[in-house]
Image (cartoon, rainbow, N blue to C red):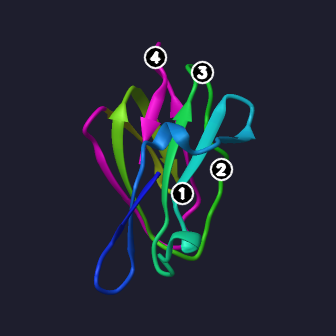
Amino acid sequence: MRAIKTRRQLMKVSNYLETEPTEEVPGSLKREVITAKDGAPNFAMRVIEVKPGGSSPFHTHPWEHEVFILSGQAVVKGEQGETEIAKDSVIYIAPEEKHCFVNKGNEPLRFV
């Protein structure tokens, strides 16, 4: 990771693969690449990778969720059903809406 000094605080520049992953459920890795530890009190950036046939946990949280699909094919499940998604899809999930991502393809599903 490189830190670049700006007038107010440090800018973080890194390769996401340098961030140690955690496994929330078998087959789903999460890398928390920008957090409050980086000086971002109102934002978190995570890179999620789900193996073929795997899924992220069905969960909810009090903040909205904006997602960009980097690679793979999947369905996003919510309280009102499920929708097919693929590379370059953009998803908005409202606060407190239960959701998960299920990899339906043959390659890893990766999203931010």
C-alpha span from label 1 to label 2:
10 Å
Answer with mark 1 or mark 3, whichever residue precedes in sequence. Answer: 3
Q: Which label belongs to residue 59?
A: none
Residue highlighted by disc 2: 58
Q: Position of residue 20 (x, y in %)?
A: 64, 42
C-alpha span from label 1 to label 4:
26 Å
Q: Do the numbered discs 2 and 4 sit on residues whose CB atoms are within 8 Å?
A: no
Secondary element at image label 3? loop
C-alpha span from label 2 to label 4:
21 Å
Q: Residue at x 44, y 34 (%)?
A: 110
Residue type marked 3: Gly
Residue 92 within the segment the image draws in magenta: yes
Relative to the observer, which residue lies in front, 98 or 42? 42
C-alpha span from label 1 to label 3:
21 Å
Answer with mark 1 or mark 4, whichever residue precedes in sequence. Answer: 1
| Depicted 64 relative to depicted 13: above or below | below
Residue highlighted by disc 1: 79
Residue highlighted by disc 3: 53
Number of marks drawn: 4
Residue type marked 1: Glu
Residue type marked 4: Glu
Answer with mark 2 or mark 4, whichever residue precedes in sequence. Answer: 2
Q: Do the numbered discs 2 and 3 sit on residues whose CB atoms are within 8 Å?
A: no
Residue highlighted by disc 4: 107
